[in-house]
Image (cartoon, helix red, strand yellow):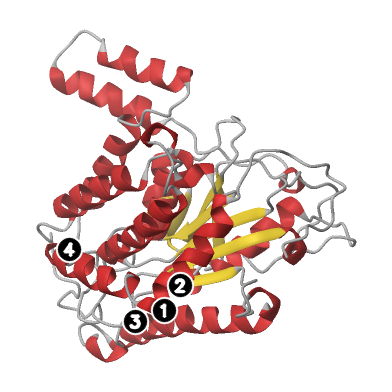
Amino acid sequence: MSGSQREPRADRDPVDTCGLCLLSLDGGGVRGLSTLIILRYLMAKVNFGYPQNETRKPCEVFDMIGGTSTGGLIAIMLGRLKMSVQECIDAYVSMFEEIFGKPIRSKVSITLQIQSQYDAEILRRCILRIVRDSSNLSEGDRRAIVEAAGMTGSAKTKSTAINAATSKILLDDSVPRGCRTFVCATAFENQDIERFRDYPRLDLGIQANVSIVDAACATSAATSFFDAVNINGRLFRDGGFKANNPVNEVWHEARQIWVGDNQDVQLDLLLKCIISIGTGETKTESMKEGVKGFIDTLKRMITQTRDTDKAFRNEHRNLTKLDGTQRYFRFNVDQGLQAVSLEQYEKKGTIEAVTKTYMESPERESLLALCANNLRMKTSVSLSQEITELDFS
């Protein structure tokens, strides 16, 4: 389904007294570490003054998290698996050291065809481990993994059984969650953006069963890095070429859930804040490998990421007022990450240092404080579905 398509919806979900808090996460390979460091700064501000045992995780302050590519993987870890930012950072760094440690082939074949450099099976194995080790699985899913671990047989047999059980854990397991999570992938047959969700959409009817592992692999399957992912007979790659900055996808998805077809409601009036986090500016000039068509596509992806932010600001000027009522926030390192490519995990020190400099600038600290104040107000008190406007003054 295309992200721009509007589907009919007869009803809508309730909004709590604070208003909606939405989070959008760009794609960017290992530079997603910059995204997580920015989030660490943000959550530190949100939790300032709270006792250690009362600090909140992103899934406890955001109503929705949507992401593309590695941003989608982060969205699943933070939202569906309810991980803390630091838990996510630890898993993220470990995973990419394993995945990108050794390419299995060159990016371009001898016939000048783009081919996958890295082993998709290693990616899948890493995601399986993250899901398996999660402390936030349902009782039934956890029991299935424990039963597999208790099987008689060789270590290999047990490992295969555990992976099989983990692979069956659904993204949408029919468990209601305060934080909804979705990820973007691109369908091969029509190049449309598909959203894989951990929640039902009544207007869409019954959704196909998609596992957490399959959704995470699909949104992470960047062209030239990993092979496409087969889900229920359809092939998917990451959503980077059309929605590398998925802020519009988050907006449209939120509108369908909390506004629907109610003509008396506008999403702007229910929104406390929408935060978009990038993975750092990239120079198109630095990409010189590969065939021309592929490079042109990458350049369009980078341009699209920048243009999406600009267009969103222009369309929603009421959310970007610089008078203390700002509700749209975009964080994206502007200098220092241009030379870091998507697979250079060994530059994690550079990513962290550059992001730290960016976040500790006076301009960013001021913006961060305003952003965190919005999130600190988050409550769990629900209002009636008839609420059409909240006062954010």
Q: Residues within 10 Å of mark 4 (few under 14, many from 20)?
A: some
Q: Secondary structure at mark 1?
A: helix
Task: Please say if the residues under marks 1 and 2 sit with CB atoms less than 8 Å apart.
Answer: yes
Q: Residues within 10 Å of mark 3 (few under 14, many from 20)?
A: some
Quadrant for the C terminus, please: bottom right
Residue picked out by circle 1 = 363
Sequence-wise first label, 1 or 4: 4
Q: Residue at x 26, y 85 (%)?
A: 291
Task: Please say if the residues under marks 1 and 3 sit with CB atoms less than 8 Å apart.
Answer: no
Which amino acid lies under the numbered mark 2 shown in the image of this protein? Ser
Residue picked out by circle 2 = 366
Q: CA distance from mark 1 to mark 4?
A: 24 Å
Q: Is residue 40 left or right of residue 322?
A: left
Sequence-wise first label, 2 or 4: 4
Q: Residue at x 11, y 63 (%)?
A: 346
Task: Please say if the residues under marks 2 and 4 sit with CB atoms less than 8 Å apart.
Answer: no
Residue picked out by circle 4 = 348
Q: CA distance from mark 2 to mark 4?
A: 26 Å
Closer to viewer: mark 2 or mark 4: 2
- Picture layout, residue 31 above or below residue 87: below
x and y, in percent, of residue 197 in the image: 56, 46
Closer to viewer: mark 1 or mark 4: 1
x and y, in percent, of residue 115 in the image: 24, 68
x and y, in percent, of residue 27 in the image: 39, 66
Closer to viewer: mark 2 or mark 3: 2
Which amino acid lies under the numbered mark 1 shown in the image of this protein? Glu
Residue picked out by circle 3 = 334
Q: Secondary structure at mark 2?
A: helix
Q: CA distance from mark 4 to mark 3?
A: 17 Å
- Picture layout, residue 108 above or below residue 44: below
| Residue 218 visible (yes or no) | no
